[in-house]
């Protein structure tokens, strides 16, 4: 099977040029600049007027995540299908063991759950406690399972969160191996105290979720994470940065040469705390951790993307239905935390970043695809348009316009936090491993199967 995409504008993190891409056996076989002869092929897509991007890499999704309100409402099939409709061809999800469960057993269980995934995928493994087996299990993840990437939570202390000294131990192990530790930064103990105070005062409506998680509890936690990582020489990736002061700490640490990466998500760039005004039905969709912040924080995050303090855009895709959110109708602490967005990451960043000249189109490709692939050891198979890379490609129509809505999205939820938001620029074709999967808003091949991406640290570009 071969395919030629001709007459498009090829965009990578570093270059923009007119040309054609010839694909054979699932890989990019050759790239020709405009004017050069194009290899003959049985299948041709004319991409005149379109951009050709590497497939999106979303480094932060929670498909089929177990919570007290039931599983997040997208499983690996529905979530990855929605991802493909939005131009994301690789996702990174999580392995979150129960306390007391073997990490390796949880990895195997998660791999089985992910077999229905349509995109390619890998995982961050979350140690949720420190036990006598943790060090050897983390090393097994790296050397046997092909997963050198981990995640710890400084919040959620009574379920999956770790104490600072335990995080230091995880960092020592991960740092020695050259792996990466992703961190959810919020000061869990202080949040728990605020929860108790609010509960004792009967302040349990959804907006108190946001009041119980102020920005300084995120930025202080970022400071601690940076300090621990410096002491243990561990490469860290701070997920879903939402607050201006967090950005300041990260910028400072990067200036001092520390190996630290930061991610934000479209919701923290585009939405703000005004979403917490209203009745339960209006506010509950926006209950997520960290919560939405001020407009000043939105602006600081855009600037941090432009000056490379923030290197990566994830979604933290974790949708629930309104029925699930209603578990917390009388107590915000029971509202499941999270919102969907895997389908909208590219169109939102393109519309509100590229079209408004906040970022260049190359920076768009860099933070939605190339950098997440580099940081997590998937580059140059993923995140690049180059000879030998996987033929995961998005053909992007810069003129396509639509209004986002739960009525028309592919995410499995009756909620969409971007309801009514207009976007300009969207997916025309999605090609995965050389096959056309999405064509003009329709799925062409529903038997497509994603594969688990085993990472070998010896083969990856460790310079990043
Ligand atoms: O509210 C959120 N973000 N839910 C998903 C879990 C997490 O903290 O990343
Ligand atoms: Zn988180
Ligand atoms: Zn998350």
Image (cartoon, rainbow, N blue to C red):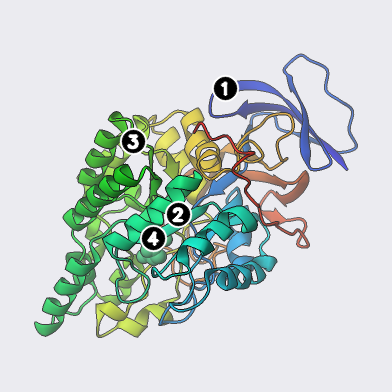
Q: Secondary structure at mark 1?
A: loop
Q: Secondary structure at mark 2?
A: loop
Nearest-to-viewer mark from 2 and 4: 4
Looking at the image, is 457 positioned above or below residue 127?
Answer: above
Q: In terms of image quadrants, where is residue 163?
A: bottom left
Nearest-to-viewer mark from 1 and 3: 3
Lower sequence index among marks 4 and 1? 1
Asked if the residue at tag 2 contacts the one at tag 1, i.e. Cβ–Cβ closer than 8 Å, the answer is no
Q: Residue furthest front?
A: 132
Lower sequence index among marks 3 and 2? 3
Q: Is residue 83 left or right of residue 293?
A: right
Lower sequence index among marks 3 and 4? 4
Q: Residue furthest top?
A: 35
Residue labelled with disc 3: 258
* Distance (Cα) linking label 3 and label 2: 25 Å
Residue in the picture at 36% in, 36% down? 305
Residue labelled with disc 2: 315
10 Å neighbourhood of mark 3: few (<14), some, or many (≥20)?
some
Where residue 453 appears, as percent x and y from the top left, is 65, 52
Residue in the picture at 23% in, 58% down? 273
Residue labelled with disc 1: 15
């Amino acid at each position: 099977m071969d395919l030629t995409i001709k007459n498009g504008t090829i965009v990578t993190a570093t270059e923009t040029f007119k040309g054609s891409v010839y694909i054979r056996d699932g890989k990019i076989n050759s790239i020709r600049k405009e004017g050069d002869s194009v290899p003959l092929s049985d299948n041709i897509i004319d991409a005149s007027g379109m951009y050709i991007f590497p497939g999106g890499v979303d480094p932060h999704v929670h498909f089929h995540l177990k919570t007290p309100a039931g599983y997040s409402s997208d499983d690996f099939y529905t979530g990855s299908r929605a991802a493909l409709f939005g131009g994301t061809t690789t996702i990174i999800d999580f392995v979150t063991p129960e306390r007391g469960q073997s990490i390796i057993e949880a990895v195997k269980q998660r791999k089985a759950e992910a077999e229905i995934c349509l995109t390619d995928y890998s995982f961050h493994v979350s140690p949720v406690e420190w036990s006598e087996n943790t060090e050897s299990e983390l090393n097994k993840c790296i050397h046997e399972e092909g997963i050198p990437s981990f995640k710890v939570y400084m919040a959620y202390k009574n379920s999956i969160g770790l104490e600072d000294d335990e995080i230091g131990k995880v960092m020592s192990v991960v740092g020695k191996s050259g792996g990466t530790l992703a961190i959810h930064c919020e000061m869990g103990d202080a949040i728990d105290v605020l929860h108790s105070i609010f509960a004792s005062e009967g302040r349990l409506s959804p907006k108190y979720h946001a009041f119980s998680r102020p920005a300084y509890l995120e930025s202080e936690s970022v400071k601690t994470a940076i300090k621990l990582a410096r002491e243990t020489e561990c490469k860290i990736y701070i997920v879903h940065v939402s607050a201006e002061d967090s950005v300041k700490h990260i910028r400072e640490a990067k200036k001092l040469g520390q190996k630290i990466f930061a991610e934000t998500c479209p919701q923290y760039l585009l939405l703000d705390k005004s979403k917490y005004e209203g009745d339960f039905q209006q506010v509950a969709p926006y209950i997520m951790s960290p919560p939405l912040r001020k407009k000043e924080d939105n602006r600081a995050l855009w600037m941090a993307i432009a000056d490379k303090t923030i290197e990566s855009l994830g979604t933290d895709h974790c949708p629930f239905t309104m029925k699930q959110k209603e578990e917390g109708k009388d107590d915000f602490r029971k509202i499941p935390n999270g919102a969907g967005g895997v389908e909208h990451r590219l169109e939102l960043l393109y519309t509100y970043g590229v079209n408004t000249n906040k970022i260049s189109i190359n920076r768009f490709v860099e933070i939605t695809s190339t950098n997440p692939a580099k940081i997590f050891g998937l580059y140059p198979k993923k995140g690049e348009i180059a000879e030998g890379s996987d033929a995961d490609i998005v053909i992007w129509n810069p003129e396509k316009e639509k209004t986002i809505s739960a009525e028309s999205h592919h995410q499995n939820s009756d909620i969409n936090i971007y309801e009514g938001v207009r976007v300009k620029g969207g997916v025309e074709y999605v090609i995965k491993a050389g096959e056309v999967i999405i064509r003009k808003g329709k799925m062409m091949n529903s038997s497509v199967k994603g594969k688990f991406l085993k990472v070998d640290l010896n083969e990856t570009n460790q310079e990043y």
